[in-house]
Image (cartoon, rainbow, N blue to C red):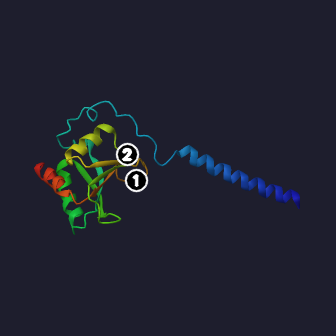
Amino acid sequence: MSRARNLVLLLIVLVCVASLWFAWRDGPATPDPPASPPGDAATAAPDRPVAPDETITLAVLNGSGEPGLARRVSRLLPAAGVVVVAVGNAPHDTFSRTLLVDRRLDPARRRQLVHLLADPAVVREWDRRCEEEAVLVLGRDHGRIVTALERLR
């Protein structure tokens, strides 16, 4: 009886160790971003739209409370070289300032996008598991971003 109990205990410990090892091997959900790759992306001019081979995938969320804003802005973003992969509402509609949540952009592309979007606040939540490279949460100050994007048309 004690031998069977010891085997069960050993099996449980092995499962726990394997689980921890897999979690450690995959790394944390928010690792440091990679260094900027050499080439055009690192030296890209910040005031031009993103080149087709440098497209950025973005989710657009409305945090301003203005109906249809995320959809309207998502229609302006392709002129900036941005591919919109999701449109929706933010968890609440009381964002006073627009945020760009960086999921996995390299620094040069992040700077370029921030410049194209009229300098929104940037929050880094590094997560390579997301489909999008960044999330744009539109706040009540969205007018300057809409104006900047309309200039690119």
Q: Position of residue 46 (x, y in %)?
A: 20, 38
Q: Residues within 10 Å of mark 1 (few under 14, many from 20)?
A: few
Q: Position of residue 123 (x, y in %)?
A: 35, 49
Q: Position of residue 114 (x, y in %)?
A: 25, 45
Tell which residue pokes out farthest to the top in this image: 38
Which is more toward the observer, 37 or 125? 125
Q: Quadrant of residue 49?
A: top left
**Residue at x-position 40% and y-position 49%:** 125
Task: Please tell me whether residue 60 is drawn above or below residue 113 in the rendered image.
Answer: below
At mark 1, the secondary structure is loop
**Residue at x-position 27% and y-position 42%:** 54
Please give the label number shown on residue 130. 1
- The CA span between labels 1 and 2 is 9 Å
At mark 2, the secondary structure is loop
**Residue at x-position 59% and y-position 48%:** 22
Report the amino acid beneath label 2: Arg
Report the amino acid beneath label 1: Cys
Tell which residue pokes out farthest to the right in this image: 1
Q: Residues within 10 Å of mark 2 (few under 14, many from 20)?
A: many
Tell which residue pokes out farthest to the bottom in this image: 67
Which is more toward the observer, 99 or 94? 94
Horizontally, residue 16 falls left or right of residue 23, namely right
For the N terminus, the image quarter is: bottom right
Ranked by sequence position, the earlier of labels 1 and 2 is: 2
Which is more toward the observer, 144 or 104? 144
**Residue at x-position 87% and y-position 56%:** 3
Instruction: Please state the total of marks drawn on the protein image.
Output: 2
Horizontally, residue 56 falls left or right of residue 12, namely left
Whether residues under marks 1 and 2 lie with C-beta atoms below 8 angstroms apart, the answer is: yes
Q: Quadrant of residue 38?
A: top left
Q: Position of residue 145 (x, y in %)?
A: 18, 53
Residue labelled with disc 2: 104
